[in-house]
Amino acid sequence: MTEPAFGAPWQARAFAMVRALQDAGVVTAGEWADALGAQIRRAETAGDPDDYYGHWLAALEQLVVQRELTTDGALSDSRTAWADAARRTPHGAPIELG
């Protein structure tokens, strides 16, 4: 039996977002590889644990801010909204914003 490509649905979604940005011409494969590599190097230097898709997400967030598709503030607001929604959602129920 083969292992799934992604450990969680959010990982597949992050992968799909990067592919969509590449397909739309917002970022090239080379720019993505550079951004992900730089993020992994920063994490290694900081002694962060090995979290490949966490690094993937951080690189994606950095790129969309650099390309002015969103802002750091909007990303922070989204993180806060999801955390608040997760806290008030009973275990096993879908998390709903708003």
Image (cartoon, grey):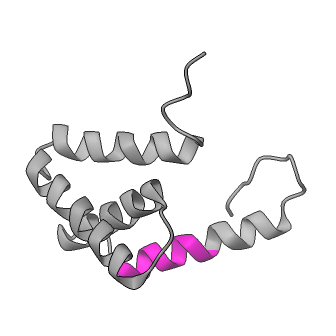
Residue furthest to the right in view is 90
- Measured from the top left, where is residue 2 in percent x and y? 55, 20
Who's the residue at 47% across and 76% down the image? 48
Left or right, residue 46 beside residue 32: right
Is residue 34 visible in the rendered image? The answer is yes
> Which residue is pictured at 32% across the width and 60% down the height?
60
| Residue 96 coordinates in the image, percent (x, y) | 72, 55
Quadrant assignment, res 53: bottom left
Residue extending furthest toward the top? 1
Expressed as whole percent of the image width and height from the top left, the position of residue 29 reads 13, 46
Q: Is residue 73 magenta?
A: yes
Q: Is 44 left or right of 31, judged from the image as shown?
A: right
* Nearer-the-camera pick, 20 or 2: 2
Compared with residue 15, is residue 55 higher up or lower down, i.e. above or below?
Answer: below
Identify the residue at image location x=74%, y=53%: 95
In the image shown, does 79 or 39 lie closer to the viewer? 39
Left/right placement of residue 39 relative to residue 55 reads left
Q: Which residues are magenta?
A: 72-80
Q: Quadrant of residue 37?
A: bottom left
Q: In the rendered view, would you say 78 is above or below 57?
A: below
Quadrant of the image for the C terminus? bottom right
Q: Is residue 54 left or right of residue 82?
A: left
**Which of the two residues, 45 or 31, is positioned nearer the viewer here?**
45
Q: Is residue 93 above or below residue 90?
A: above
